[in-house]
Amino acid sequence: MRDAFLKYWRGILLTAIGAVATIWLALSGQLGLYIHPRYFAFTAIMAGIALVFVLVALVLPRQRDDGHAQDHDHDHEVEPRARPAWRGRLAVASSAVLLVATAAALLALPPTTLSTSLADGRDLSASGIVGENAIELASADPASFTVKDWAVLIADGASGSVLQDASPRIVGFVIADPETPETTFAVARYVMTCCAVDAQPVGIRVELPGWQERFADGAWVEVGGRFAQASDGWVLRAESVETIEQPAEPYVY
Amino acid sequence: MRATLAPTPGHEHRQRSRGRFVWLAIAAVLILGGVGVRLATQGGATLPNALQDGVTLAVSVFVESLPFIVLGVLLSVVVQVWLPARWIERALPRTPWLRRVLLSLLGVFLPVCECGNVPLARGLISRGLSPAESITFLLAAPILNPVTIITTYQAFGWDHGILVARIVGGFVIANLVGWVFSRHPDPQTVLTPSFAASCAAHHDEEGGRRWSRSVARFAEEMSTLLPALLVGSAIAGLIQVGIPREWLEALGANPIWSVLALMALAFVVSICSNVDAFFMLAFGSVFLPGGIVAFLTFGAMVDIKMVALMRTTFRTSTVVQITAIVGLASLALGLGVNLLA
């Protein structure tokens, strides 16, 4: 039973947890908390295939000649030292812990976005963002722009006229400006290129004296206003700021 | 170890089917238990910020990698169960270095991320390829595949020779490591004893129904690879919360330290080779091009997640040797690019 667990059922159980968790994320529309939308279909299909294998393995009898008896004989040919009993027990115990921890992390804990504190002190400019062409953006409809699009236009440096005429409404979370925290904050979001591991904060600076009395660092807000050229680059002079719930899709892509 | 009294066939059959229901019950308890806890604590269960971020990062590495592992295992099952045994042998040339060169280009047809290549490399070994040949494939395929080349081009174009250095460097390093291991006096000893044993077992076994053998192979590969992937993802997620990124960024402008710092970053973040160029672009303004090339070659071949996965197949000493050769060669490549650029 121990060998069957370590060689066969451990994989089936872990695959079951991983596939169910992935499909649950896909069905509840939360896959975007972890990976870029371009992988949604591939990820869901592979999880479905994995689940079929799991169900077949759980329901149909395991093939007889293929299991431990044969491998066991060969174990003795290649590895004459038998595994001490305590190592076997340790392997079973650590695998059991891994199973429970995996079920806890993937199923029991609610899926969530990265905390805003990871963005503190990071470069918020769009200098590292690719795939966006500032010239194309300049002729697009600004109503659909995210904070990333505006940050790309600002980083481009040559879009002054577009910025001057714009009256954007921008959704993001609040990060206090490290230099002038009393009057300025950044409204930022994480940009994901592949998965949450590569999430980079991108934001633009917002001027609103006394903002700290109205909302806290890390709060989600929708800011409206107009861009103005300050001594150290473009800032958004806020005309309206509302605190909002975190959007269902907190990342931008 | 095992009971020596042979049970009667009928008794054994009953035991087997009872055993199966035990596992079905355990699967149900784990899944329904997890789902139950989530529904019962709706929004209530929260961890401290740093730990929660570590868990979120680890889960994202796992969710991103799992479909590639599944695809890799499926390809490995096809190679092991469905392809005729001598087919690969006949398709490849006899000259060892030419075989390795061809195998390092196999990734062009199999644009799977590096973690998906591990099960396939395992399948190729159990189908008779030498460890050196499968290592060459394992290291080259993440870089020499169309998706990686296109994303690297999108991110960097022809700037500073980054694209060319990555492609040529990846090819040369993979074949260098393959050549080194082909000189090994006893190649089977680079494999873990249990993997070598299961290869020997699978060589002999041609009978049985293919579908049930496919399911068995799938379960065995998942039993080996998923624990490694999970532990690798957990370490990669938690370590990122533990090591402030600024430490690495502070080293970026120095010609030597920028290369070493970015190799350390590549090892830690364990990002897929298909998209790491986009990730790297964020550092493009901070780091010298040699560091970026070292990141893009070293990280595609070796990182925390890959070390955990490679350990399922190769002995620790083999993994250390692969890491050392790839690391030194990437360092030399990075320093060379910094000198020329």
Image (cartoon, coloured by chain):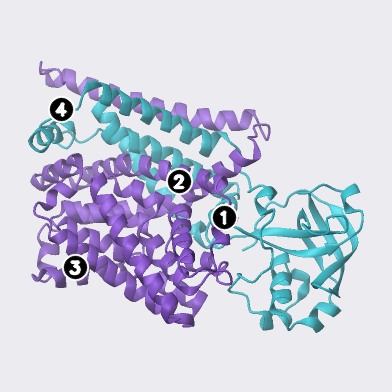
Which residue sits at x=19%, y=27%?
A83
Q: Which residue is mark 2?
A: B233
- Chain letter of mark 4 equals A
Q: Evaluate whether label 1 is on the same chain as label 4.
A: no
Query: Do tags 3 and 2 sit on the same chain?
Result: yes
Amino acid of disc 1 = Trp
From what the image shows, is residue B248 above or below residue A215? below
Question: From the image, which quarter does the N terminus of chain B lie in?
Answer: top left
Where's residue B156, x and y in %?
Answer: 50, 77
- Residue B127 tag number: none
Q: Residues within 10 Å of mark 2 (few under 14, many from 20)?
A: many
The residue that label 3 is drawn on is B100
* Element type where label 4 sits in the image: loop
Residue drawn at (38%, 60%) of the image: B113
**Callout 1: SS:** helix
Q: Residues within 10 Å of mark 3 (few under 14, many from 20)?
A: many
